[in-house]
Image (tube, coloured by chain):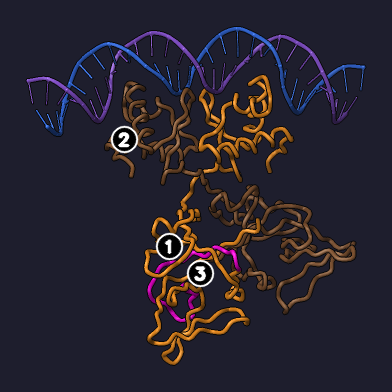
Chain colours: A orange, B brown, C purple, D blue
Amino acid sequence: MKEEITDRQKEILNFIQDYVDFNGFPPTYREIAKQFNLASTFGVKRHIDALVKKGFLNNANNSSRTLSLVVNNNPIQKGPVVEIPVVGRVAAGQPILAQENIEGTFSIDKSFLGNHLQCFGLKVRGDSMINAGILEGDLVIIQPQKEAVNGEIIVALIGDDATMKKYVVEENKIFLVPENEKYKAIVIENDEDFSIIGKVIGVFRSYN
Amino acid sequence: MKEEITDRQKEILNFIQDYVDFNGFPPTYREIAKQFNLASTFGVKRHIDALVKKGFLNNANNSSRTLSLVVNNNPIQKGPVVEIPVVGRVAAGQPILAQENIEGTFSIDKSFLGNHLQCFGLKVRGDSMINAGILEGDLVIIQPQKEAVNGEIIVALIGDDATMKKYVVEENKIFLVPENEKYKAIVIENDEDFSIIGKVIGVFRSYN
DNA sequence: TGACATAGTGCTCATTTGTTCACTATATTG
DNA sequence: CAATATAGTGAACAAATGAGCACTATGTCA
């Protein structure tokens, strides 16, 4: 377990982290000194050296601007991750991954996706799937596909409306089955404007 | 639409991007020169200036190491991922993050964790929290803390047994409340061997 | 063929940034 | 009360890094 760091060291560490997040590059000693109203870069260097020694930072000697944070004994760096586009809404007629639909991206461990690399994220609206452990506000990962297998949770369009339900086929009829007693299954009539967008392959929830 | 960039400019842009991904901070002119076997930093500066002008890079004047990439007219919002250790079991008496407990790691978008960087993953065993959208087999992210707030979902030890429940305090009594009608709340008696490991800050589920 | 664009050199200098020393002040601990 | 730890200053200096000039070489285009 790492040594404890002092309150001042923690403040400096947090500042470095925020600075990197905001700027895309780390601060210099003088920038840290300015932030904490310190007159001497040597005072800053003492704190930095302590944080490096205690395993919270990396730093290159005799180079400018090379502070980098260490988390869980690893420098923060990209592992084998995939960046997934997060889509705001699914609508009829236009490509889901059209640029104007993309609200951001979400990075996730590549192993989590298996072979499904061409996928996208979608925020859950509504509570129709709570018995399947999918709550409002969750981020679901959708693998685009036009057909589904019985029992899969899918995102589909009925007319212009997007919906996420379990896909069930019985007696040659298609049912979109909610996992919440409050709602009834939707029966898809043959002539209905219905299309499958994709299936849910993952769920993410943050309690922050 | 942005102006076209030359092949050489594209090479330099890619190098900068890879360098930032790998190191957590951008290269200097001299490091770029070294990479491309250029003898003069002025040649590098000419390319950088062109990329800035064409909208592919940002750079601060008279500062070292401040190159940052611009994507979709926005600087790449540094979204580093964090590797979280995944713990196999939580047991009494030994440090949770002892090396022998760690089964692997899981990379996740740092923004997902907010300020909770020192955390770990835990596979869910049991179905006591299904009404809270947490199913058996899910991966939950635990922020270590020794005390909890009313209503938080926590991981705790009762004797040698680890459990995940909602933490509820009523009439000066502590209850560990399942979110499944099949189970009853656990009352924590004052002399009981009980300790809180941490709180749940995120949930991940894969359907692969 | 000349103008222009692209790509680079050699070099010097200005500025930024990191390193270090000897010192002070305050709090904690044995 | 002395030793130690933490936190800092003032200052000087070394090294890193950016800025910029006058030049050359090559390819493209009108």
Nearer-N-terminus badge (2/3): 2
Real-space Cα separation, disc 3 to disc 1, in angstroms? 14 Å
Q: Circle 2 — which element?
A: helix
- What whole-number distance in Å separates the C-alpha atoms at marks 2 and 3? 42 Å
Spot occupied by residue B30 in the image (x, y as percentages of width and height): 40, 25
B114 or B148, which is in the foreground? B114
Residue A138 lies in the magenta-colored region = yes
Considering the numbered disc 3 on the image, is that residue within a helix, a strand or a loop?
Answer: loop
At x 41%, y 36%, the residue is: B57
Do the CB atoms of the residues marked 2 and 3 lie less than 8 Å apart? no
Task: Give B160 or A195, whichever is nearer the viewer.
Answer: A195
Magenta highlight range: A136-155
Q: Chain of mark 3?
A: B
Amino acid type at circle 2 is Gln
Instruction: Name the residue that disc number 1 marks.
Output: A119
Q: Nearer the viewer, mark 3 or mark 1?
A: 1
Amino acid at pointer 1: Cys
Q: CA distance from mark 2 to mark 1?
A: 31 Å
**Whole-percent x and y of residue A167?**
47, 80
Give the number of the disc on residue A54. Answer: none
Residue at x-position 39% and y-position 87%: A190
Q: Chain of mark 2?
A: B
Q: Are marks 3 and 1 on the same chain?
A: no
- Residue occupying image coordinates x 58% and y 36%: A19
Residue B96 in the image: above or below residue B61: below
Label 1: chain? A
In the picture of the structure, the residue carrying the numbered disc 3 is B207
The residue to which callout 2 is attached is B9
